[in-house]
Amino acid sequence: MDTRAALDSIHSGAPPATYGPLGSSAPTVHPWSLYGPWQRWLYFGLLFAVTAFNYFDYFIVAVLLEPIKQEFHVSDTALGLLSGMCFALIFAAAAVPIARWADRGNRRTVITVALSGWSVMTIACGFAQSFWQLALARFGVGITEPGAMPPSQSLIADYFPPERRASATSILCGGASSVGWLLGIGIGGLIASRYGWRVAFVLAGVPGLLLALIVRAVLPEPRTHLLATVKRCDIETAWQSIGQLRRKQSFVLSVVAISVYAIFSYGVTAFVASFMTRSFHAPMTDVSGPLGCAIAVANLVGSAIGGWVADKLGSRNPRWYARLPACACIVALPLYLLALSADNLGLAIGIEFFAEVVLGVGIPLVFTTIMVVCGGHRRSIASAVLYCAMVLIGGSLGPFLTGVLSDSFAAAAGADSLRYALMAMCAFLLPAAAAFWASSGVIFQDQEA
């Protein structure tokens, strides 16, 4: 919950301030005043690890699609359903209830339960004896993963003062996703090539259970400290919060923009490793390691640059929080087309590296945009709505549409069918850029502390 007044009033014996008021003029408490710099970054590190494992358990299925296809004899369309819709539908159904729990309850508990849940279900994927058992286990992953990012972003806003949030949020979203990609595509591919795809799933799930114990023991919940001295005011219902968010044009446009972008992003993520394996006739180990490292480094570099730039520009003009994602989409489009049209593996990965740096600079800032306009008491709900739209629209349509296009092009293009399917998916970057830019024009009127 965002807060506004000094903590000093509590220490001086003044009447306790109100934490998280809705429409109240009562003074409130800065939760980030409770923590020193080293504590903030320690807790950030834990949230970064949670988010990285969240992406790890999601991304690993992308590099395992080929051996899964061979064992269960399924089509690319079925693989698109497995990597997209099986996960997305249940994720969307669970996102708002879990976010509501995070906005009203103990976010540390939400993260611990969610992390334990998706780790167990990832392990269960490794024991699937049929394609439908695997799909059911992916449903289990989808129902628990909404408990990671929304409460993590909400906690980041409590740990860090406003002038540091853009960099922290950008690194959390962009950097952690890159580490998760490296683990899923790089390490997961290496394990699968040596020991099989089932072992890869099992080894992806076990570390998350250990991390859940650490989170439960170390990560603080600012509300537990504040509520010892602070009285809470009325809380909006989930539907009231969503109704308020719907009235904010910048929020709605951000949701539209990230959803359209996600159709491209999820489609490419699910199939880019398979494209390189097929089109360049490369073994999995030659693809997974270099690709995983390239994307991981690119996103880490991009998110660090984007967060720093956004802190500088956004502190003076918050429109830049939305303008930077728009510019990133425009610049990345030709780079991605060049990467997908390359005639060798090294060149394709090299060009994609620069495309991912550009996207890493801009895309994570959409979460900073919504934090500016959503209001402190709606952070988890706002983040959940954004993720819900991303996963439900992008996660469902992206891999599915890519798989359908690949199957459609197969007769004419053969092994290159995925190449042309992925090139077609790049077209979604244009409307995404337009929606991001439109969002930047109405941020001022929607700002809410």
Image (cartoon, rainbow, N blue to C red):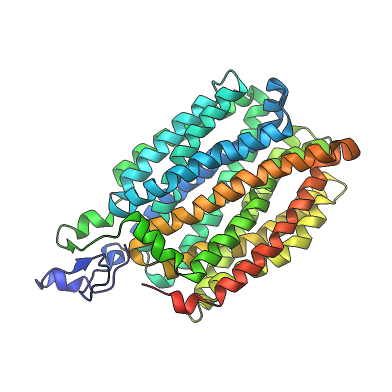
Q: x, y percentage for residue 53?
A: 50, 42
Q: x, y percentage for residue 305?
A: 58, 66
Residue projecting furthest to the right: 412
Does residue 201 appear to the left or right of 409 in the view shown? left
Q: x, y percentage for residue 204?
A: 53, 33
Of residues 180 and 436, the one nearer the viewer is 436
Q: Quadrant location of residue 335? A: bottom right
Quadrant the C terminus occupies: bottom left
Q: Quadrant location of residue 158? A: bottom left
Does residue 80 appear to the left or right of 1 in the view shown? right
Q: Would residue 327 be seen by someone viewing this image from the given angle?
A: yes
Q: x, y percentage for residue 348?
A: 80, 50
Q: Is residue 332 above or below residue 284?
A: below
Q: Is residue 198 above or below residue 326?
A: above
Residue projecting furthest to the top: 129
- How many numbered discs, if any? 0
Quadrant the N terminus occupies: bottom left
Residue in the image at 81% along x and 45% along y = 419
Residue in the image at 73% along x and 30% along y = 75
Of residues 68 and 94, the one nearer the viewer is 94
